[in-house]
DNA sequence: GTGGCGATTTGGATCGTTCCAAAACGACAG
DNA sequence: CTGTCGTTTTGGAACGATCCAAATCGCCAC
């Protein structure tokens, strides 16, 4: 093995100062682009910085200045494209503002959420963007991050609302309106027997969407049969399996508002196995507009949440909070947009 | 607006020490679980820590100990599920080892790559996991991260190999063998006229895969027609458009090895528009095994790269490097696995 | 030659932790 | 009572930056 270079110490402010005969304070001013330093000195110092390959130690600076240059991002699962896109949007905006993103994921476990939060705050982030794990409790989160930490909640409320954390900002999706719009679209297509398919009632986003569906059905004075509500895991496979439950009694639905795109795609698979063609014999809508929705057969009518834009928005909201810690807490409801494709064809007479 | 609590200073070691009448040094020992401290003192200190809601300041500790507790992860694009899964694997393993992940993404731009690297190293990561942007140069990367920084290259080589960065570790996919295996599979299915579809030759992963294809074709003594190599952007849409180019001359291929899954799915779309049914009239293989591959119609034969496992592996390789900075540089080639589904059906006589 | 003024530069304390050598403590033997 | 030894505890100097009040410089007017 060839011998590595003698692993010399990292070069610091002091080395630069010594290297060109000025004080540490002066070098520090140069680094921060202060107008106080003389043009000529600045040039000399900058040359020396390059020569020695100086790397700024932001941790040391943050310690002294009592500031932070990072933001923690805690999400459920990067493998889920919705969150991956969200994370991409967050990172993009934070990066542009000079912050670095500290990543953590919880796999929907509140215990891991606690552990991850605990580990992240030790690194002194300026704030936290948190998409809570299902069942996460306000009091636990509050006690591990402390009352001073700026927090932005995304996508879900915490359980057991406390007055103490009312000062946290929120960015939520308009789940209810989205599902209502989808249902109204199906009604406008002539459907009268419309199911709500997939998800679990105890998930908050699912119950919000169900509420939107109910709202539209009631507004149109349409009856709802009990077997038109089928719960599933939010996965394609489980959705495909449970397709038959929609047809176990009369009257059979002719359309379904699905909890999300994964479930909708699974349902279309299940329909195909029954010999039904989605968009022709049965109308389907999804929720999320994942990349695949545009390419499925048939292409899926769904609600675009634009998770990347939501990520940018979340980052911006948190940055605004950092600039103005005293401002009132805000709750932002991001609109979702109906994208009509071929899966939601009009009712045909049997 | 209700007045917030008086924004008291963060509680530090000194506060705890004062609070229970011991020295800072003792509290520090307690925090690190040293066996030196008396059982009784420890209990008192721990109680005080809880009481005051102390939060460990890892940045300060790292400064003093000259250590790091973070790793930088620089990838092209979180929106790409391959990288999202990879990042999830990295974060999972780093988190378990007590490290925090600093995220950065480059959008395939070498300039952004420079900027992101520059910003991340200022936060003092212990090492970097880098999936280089296309066209990224070794010398530039080396000069911004410095020669001391442990680096693990994933997925791509850097351009302009320098002897100076030979000490960096590598984790690469076995692109060539993967494409060879796929081609051999199609040959075994009876196909003789096999195209290589999609991607651009100047992408290194694409040229490696093409090389594997060539290797298999030559080993089987099969001829290759010029119009069997169609270049596309690595997207579904462009692939669907260019499908026809495969058939612009005789003899038409009966099968295609595709650059990746996106391209393969696009090709299947294009084939459907020509009235050809993938898996029946024409065989198709992909590369990556994205989630969608298992659910397409027909399900796609492809090569599983298991990006999440690769992420875990990358993290482990870098952690090993941190434990042993002197070890020889390693190059790991991760195997890819052929997953046979229905899109690669046997040749039928016309 | 002295004083004054704006433009630059600087020493030393400080942020919150860890390291280290040395001190304090208690128990026990001589 | 003194000395020794093992167990605990501790003061003060780091780590690499920034802040601040004060010092230094050059230049010009008087």
Image (cartoon, coloured by chain):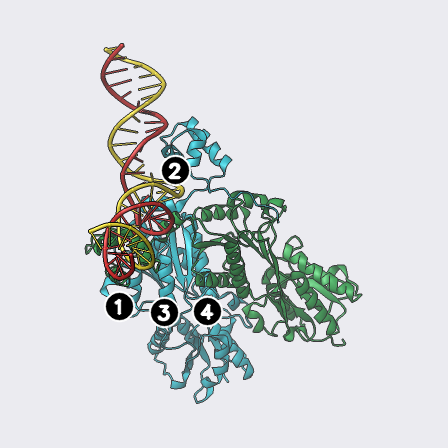
Chain colours: A cyan, B green, C red, D yellow
> Residue A161: which numbered mark, if any?
1
N-terminal of the two: label 1 or label 2? 2
Mark pair 3, 2: CA separation: 42 Å
In front of the other: B162 or A127: B162
Mark 4: which secondary structure?
strand
Q: Chain of mark 1?
A: A
Label 3 and label 4 in one chain? yes
Residue A158: give x, y in percent of width and height: 31, 67
Kindly identify which chain the residue marked by label 2 belongs to: A
The part of the image, by quadrant, that contains residue B227 is: bottom right
To which residue does mark 3 refer? A110
| Label 4 chain ID | A
Location of residue A200 in the rendering, given as x and y in whole percent from the top left corner: 39, 77
> How far is the residue under mark 3 from the one under mark 4?
30 Å
N-term mark: 2 or 4: 2
Same chain? Circles 2 and 4? yes
For mark 2, give the secondary structure: loop
Distance from the alpha carbon under mark 1 to that under mark 3: 16 Å
Q: Position of residue A35 (x, y in %)?
A: 37, 32
Relative height, residue C27 to residue A251 (above, below): above
Examine the image and state in which quarter residue B218 appears: bottom right
Task: Confirm whether circles 1 and 3 share one chain.
Answer: yes
Quarter of the picture holding the C terminus of chain B = bottom right
Please tell me whether mark 2 or mark 4 is closer to you in this view: 2
Residue wearing tag 4: A302
| Vertical side of A344 occupied by B119: above or below | above
Q: Dividing the image into 4 quarters, which one contains the N terminus of chain B? A: bottom left
**Mark nearer the N terminus (1 vs 4):** 1
Q: Residue at x 47, y 54 (%)?
A: B71
Cα distance, mark 1 to mark 2? Answer: 43 Å
Residue under circle 2?
A32
């Amino acid at each position: 093995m060839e011998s590595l270079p003698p692993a010399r110490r990292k070069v610091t402010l002091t080395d630069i100062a010594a290297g060109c005969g000025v004080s540490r304070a002066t070098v520090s001013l140069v680094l921060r682009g202060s107008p106080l330093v003389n043009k000529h000195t600045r040039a000399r110092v900058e040359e020396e910085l390059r020569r020695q390959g100086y790397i700024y130690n932001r941790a040391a600076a943050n310690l002294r200045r009592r500031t932070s240059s990072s933001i923690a991002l805690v999400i459920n699962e990067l493998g889920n494209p919705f969150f991956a896109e969200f994370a991409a949007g967050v990172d993009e905006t934070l990066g542009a503002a000079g912050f670095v993103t500290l990543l953590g994921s919880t796999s929907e476990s509140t215990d891991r959420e606690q552990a991850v939060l605990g580990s992240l705050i030790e690194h002194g982030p300026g704030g936290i963007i948190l998409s809570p794990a299902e069942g996460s409790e306000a009091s636990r989160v509050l006690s591990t991050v402390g009352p001073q930490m700026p927090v932005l909640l995304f996508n879900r409320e915490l359980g057991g609302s406390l007055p103490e954390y009312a000062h946290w900002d929120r960015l939520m999706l308009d789940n209810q309106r989205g599902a209502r719009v989808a249902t109204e679209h199906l009604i406008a297509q002539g459907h009268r027997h419309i199911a709500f398919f997939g998800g679990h009632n105890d998930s908050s986003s699912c119950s919000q969407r169900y509420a939107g569906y109910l709202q539209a059905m009631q507004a149109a004075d349409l009856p709802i049969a009990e077997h038109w509500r089928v719960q599933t895991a939010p996965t394609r496979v489980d959705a495909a399996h449970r397709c038959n439950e929609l047809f176990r009694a009369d009257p059979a639905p002719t359309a379904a508002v699905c909890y999300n795109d994964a479930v909708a795609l699974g349902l279309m698979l299940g329909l195909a196995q029954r010999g039904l063609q989605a968009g022709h014999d049965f109308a389907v809508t999804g929720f999320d507009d994942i990349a695949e929705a545009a390419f499925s057969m048939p292409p899926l009518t769904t609600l675009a949440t634009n998770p990347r834009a939501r990520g940018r928005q979340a980052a911006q909201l948190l940055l605004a909070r950092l600039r103005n810690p005293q401002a009132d807490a805000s709750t932002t409801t991001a609109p979702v947009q109906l994208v009509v494709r071929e899966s939601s064809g009009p009712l045909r007479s049997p």
